[in-house]
Amino acid sequence: MTIFPTESLHRVADLDSFLATPPDHTREPFRRLAEQLHATAPDTDPDATRPAVATLIAALRTSRGKHTALLAILLGMIAESSDESLRAAVHDGLPDYLDIARTRAGDNYALALALAYLLAHFAEDREAILVHTASLPLDAGDYARIERCLAPLNPDDPELTRVWPEPRHWRALPDTARELDRQWMRQVPPEQMRLAYHLDTRSLLAYAGAKALWTVEHGSTVTGPDPDLRLPPANPNGHRTRLGDHLAALRCPKCTGALAGDGDTVSCASCGEFPVVDGTVDLSLGAGDAHEPMTRNVPLCYSEIRPAFLRWKGSNWDGAVTVEDEDEYLRTHVQPADGPILDLGAGTGRWTAVLADTFGAERVIALDLSAAMLEHVRRGLPQVLRVRGNALSLPFNDGSLGAVNCWNALQSMPDPAAVVAEVGRCLRPGGTFTLMTFRPAVDPIYRALQTAPFGLVPVALSAPQDLRQWLAAAGMSVWEQYTPGSFLFVTAVREPR
């Protein structure tokens, strides 16, 4: 016999089955329940889901342990709906959520995370929620995310893109760095400011929900900066690679003609000179200039940003994939043909350094669209040639590169298939293309949380079969594919032309 009203049964047919399942076997019943309620895409049919929310809240009151935590996550996902009446229906259970936080979550970290995720959707009740969650067994980062999700936008200090994975890391930056951020943030038009603030909030909610789901179903998580994520140290005495060593590989980004230069200047006979700033050749044609103020201070929080991003997008909450694993993959899988080795989307140069250490710095080129990122490469690896350029139109001649590496970057590029096509064009036969990116999670519930936006930065997850098609179209064949968690490690080889 069910404990729920008969008129609700046709709407929540799988609820009783879920609640009757032992805690160690809730996975599939929970997924069936979520699918029935459109929880992974609540805007699909809000009219069908709305009447069931009250029944879920009633179940939450009487459930215990793991079942309570999973129901809280389910309600949080439904609250993501843009349908205000559906969100309001979830909000009606706020007294119950607060009561459970006060009476049942004091020694249950998984339940505390699930409730924190659910409660963080209701900024209108900020004060009451902060009072009731203050005593929950959350870590400082968990609590900081709740505070930020519930906080109203402050136009004078909006902290746009400066809250991931938690705001306190950014607030600890030097005053000069924070003031640089405030300057560009204050110039953002009000409508765009509100959108950016909303997207930041969604990123934090998705991260909180993913962490809660993992913890409820798998146990403890690995959090915090990765102690092995060391950036190249400043090396003021390192020699600069001469531009001439790689000039034959470069081409004009405007007309694709040959470039000439001596290290201080680079020019095209048809298109004129291109800037060379502190030894970095700028062939970007201004493509990244609009975003440069936003990226300027990102390297300062890189050691916190990256591990959290890999936990969320790669399902790496248990730390199964380590930085040492990544380093070893590059050392053993990059097998260049003759020619330079390109680190595409080099970022701060952490994996550029691995390539330089393995194959010699004089052979490596670091390319990124961000001048701020390349400045970090310059400080640590002055002997590596740096090129500011666009991955959608690589400034390299056909068949000029011995190998290409694209590490934790493809997902942030606006057209991954076009990037892969460019890599295939530039690679010499026999040269390898190594990449690490992310695939959509197999689990539909986790995938709904994983695919949420990363603030203003678009993140395109690549299905393995799609990536294989792009590689084949670009003249490359897959040598190895490795998919731990939701990672996608691939090594491909350029076929003869």
Image (tube, rainbow, N blue to C red):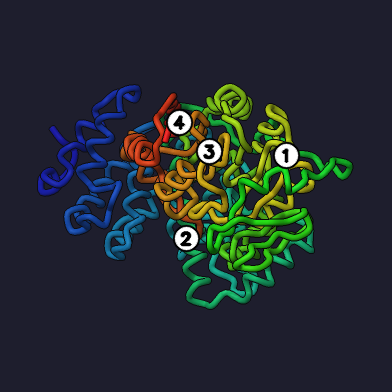
Q: Position of residue 145 (x, y in %)?
A: 55, 51
How busy is the neighbourhood of tag 3: few (under 14 within 10 Å), some, or many (20 plus)?
Answer: some
Amino acid carrying mark 2 in the image: Leu
Instruction: Identify which residue is drawn at 37% across, 49% down.
Output: 76
Instruction: Note whether 396 is above or below 24 in the view shown.
Output: below
Residue 187 screen position, x and y as percent: 61, 76
Q: Is residue 114 left or right of residue 232?
A: left
Mark closer to the chain start, 1 or 2 = 2
Residue to which mark 3 is pinned = 310
Q: Residue at x 22, y 57 (%)?
A: 46
Question: For the residue marked with disc 1, what is the amino acid?
Answer: Leu
Nearer the observer, 138 or 94: 138
* Residue wearing tag 1: 231
Where does residue 112 sit, x and y in percent of width and height? 49, 40
Q: Earlier in the sequence, mark 4 or mark 3?
A: 3
Check disc 2 and report the residue beneath it. Answer: 199
In the picture provided, is 429 more to the left or to the right than 246?
Answer: left
SS class of the residue under badge 2?
A: helix
Residue 492, numbered circle: 4
